[in-house]
Image (cartoon, helix red, strand yellow):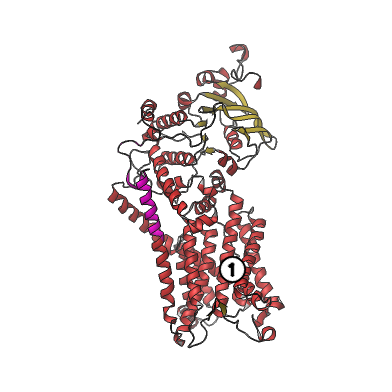
Amino acid sequence: MSTVQQESATRSEGPGRRRAGGSGGSGGTGTPDRKQQVRAALRRDLLFSAAALVVAILVILPGRNGEGTSISTMQLVASMSAMVVAAVGLNLLVGYAKLVSLGQGGFYAIGAYGSAYLTLDAGWHPVLAIVGALALCGVVGAVTALATMRMRGPQFSVITLVLAVLIERILNEGNAFGRLAGYPNFAQHDTTVMEPVTFLGITFTPPMIAGEVATVMVPIVVVTAIVVILSRNIVRSPWGASLSAIGESEMLASHLGVAVFRRKVSVFVLASVLGGLGGVIAVQAFGHLQPETFDIFLTITIVLAVVFGGSGTVLGPVVGSVAIVWLEQSDLLEQVTDLQREVSDSWYLSTTGLVGVLFLLTLFLMPRGIVGTLGRSVVPRVRGAVAGRRGTTPTNEGDGGLDDVHTEDVRAPSHPTPDGVILSLRGLGKAFGGLKAVDRMDLDVEHGSIHAIIGPNGAGKSTLANLVTGVYKPSEGTATFLDRDITGQAPHLVSRAGIGRTFQTPQLFHDETVLENVLAGFPDTGRTPLWAAALKPPSRYRRDAEMHAEAERLLELVGLAHAGDLLAGELPYGKQRALEIARALAGDPSLVVLDEPAAGLLATETAGLGDLLLTLKAEGYSLVVVEHHMDLVSKVADQVTCMEQGRLLARGSAAEVLADERVVAAYLGKPFDENEHGAAPAADTTEGDDQ
């Protein structure tokens, strides 16, 4: 284990110098390695994009001559494409952000009917009508999101379900949409089929008439492929990581710098637009709409496509949509229904009922879906094989973690802070009803220092940490960080100001790898715009390579260099603590608040944690450590504040505070007797009249 003295000698050789024998290859921070990572990432993305476009073209080759026998095949492909696009949008909500929306079928209907209505009745050019319909989906999605995103659990799902039912009833009852006669219809338009779209001199004919090539299938499958490609870019970007963070814990996401409410509204609007695009594809392929097509069963089918294929995966919605549409339009389910009728003419499941049974079986037997289940079993083996060839087989056994920290890998914050007080609390208080958890606390944290906060259970230590980091809004008092008032600011604003934190219980993405957990800690998670995530410009590739190299350095710093490909949930508790510290440092904070970081650690891990904290302090980090472990406090703290019942009990050096009779009495639960011990010393000998 490295010592602080060894680290100081290493630091004289240059900040951030990697130790000899450290992980190399893609984990290095040199320019050649980053260029290699950029090229490798670009190559993977180009291969995926090329494969998606090739598959898209291959599936429409049977209709290249316009033969009558290919019409049903092209219509099947069109139905699958529409379902894929709608399911990809829903997957962003359900699979990543864990927002179970039951309104996707409603947006599918808005896109279909909206584009048709604007073309036929409003007289818009078909292309403008499509854009207008998608804009309408976005507006309805935004209004719905603004009204529902503060709801949780079933409430949100029920509201979106009501929206889908309401849209379906409007289509059934509204005279403007032809009611049961469909849209278009003879009574209103003298035709039952929309005219093919003509754009730039090209007529995009739907797959309806034998002898005519279904040219509309080309833009349909190309658009579908592009949607899948862009969605892959999004979910593999920091923007996508923010959705996973929201799905794991909204509080955690906010501490990673994510504006949770805005991000949830954004992803709901995006999903709504993609749902509408699915409807646009359907109306362009079939040219006619019937309201009963857009009943609640459509929404259930889209949800089933996501779950059956694998929610939270890139290809899950694609696989699920293709499978579900094929099952619905093939004779297989009808044959199962016929077999039931041979047993009983009165009691049997129709196609709809069989799809429902498939949904339930998927939830019980394969909750991760087809792609998720395969990925869970195959991907770890592939990663292990690749790591084995590199000589860096991931492991969570033996040494590593905080008992094997590499303090020579510590780097100073990228934005140096001025000397003096970095955090100042004045009269800060928090009351929960009649209980004052924190009562008019004053506190100053000096730049480049470690300030420990101790006290018995229930003293208000963690509440004070939550007040600083924005979890709670104070009932009174002020908090100033780097001369900036942060009183009552939301956690994502506090994080962006330069305050990182860890939690009493490690808050991790247990189903993500160790490396992905650290990558989520970078400021990009909260600040990357959607367009950059989707289009992935060259600067995004370069930044991803920088983040990857820095994440590997941080993992080596906390002793997890060979655990990057393991799932975070597979790590023992002490290494999860180390991982959370690495993620907090990834945000490049000036001040780190650690809430009981030594809880549950082994003695060797606690000693390594102490070395790490001292090294961070030496490099210019400021630390607030809420802790019960007095050996650690004595080793690292420059100043100690002891709290009792929400108030300041004592403050001074570690030796002074731990020798204070009132502190001893508070921890042992014995009342302090002034007559026995003499007059009590001043509560704080360092701040004069401020206390």
Q: What amino acid is labelled 1 in the image? A: Gly
Q: Is 686 colored magenta in this rendering?
A: no
Residue at image coords 62%, 79%: 290
Which residue was labeled with disc 1?
276
Residue at image coords 28%, 47%: 391
Could one spot residue 210 in this view of the protein? yes
Q: Which residue ends up furthest to the front in the rendered image?
A: 201
The range drawn in magenta is 18-45
Q: 95 or 366: nearer the eye?
A: 95
Residue at image coords 57%, 67%: 275
Residue 657 locus on image (x, y percent): 54, 20
Could one spot residue 558 in this view of the protein? no
Q: 329 or 277: nearer the eye?
A: 277
Residue at image coords 40%, 31%: 608
Lateral position of residue 73 relative to residue 526, left or right: left
Q: 506 or 560: nearer the eye?
A: 560
Which image quadrant is residue 268 in?
bottom right
Mark 1: few/some/many CA within 10 Å (<14, 14-19, 20+)? many
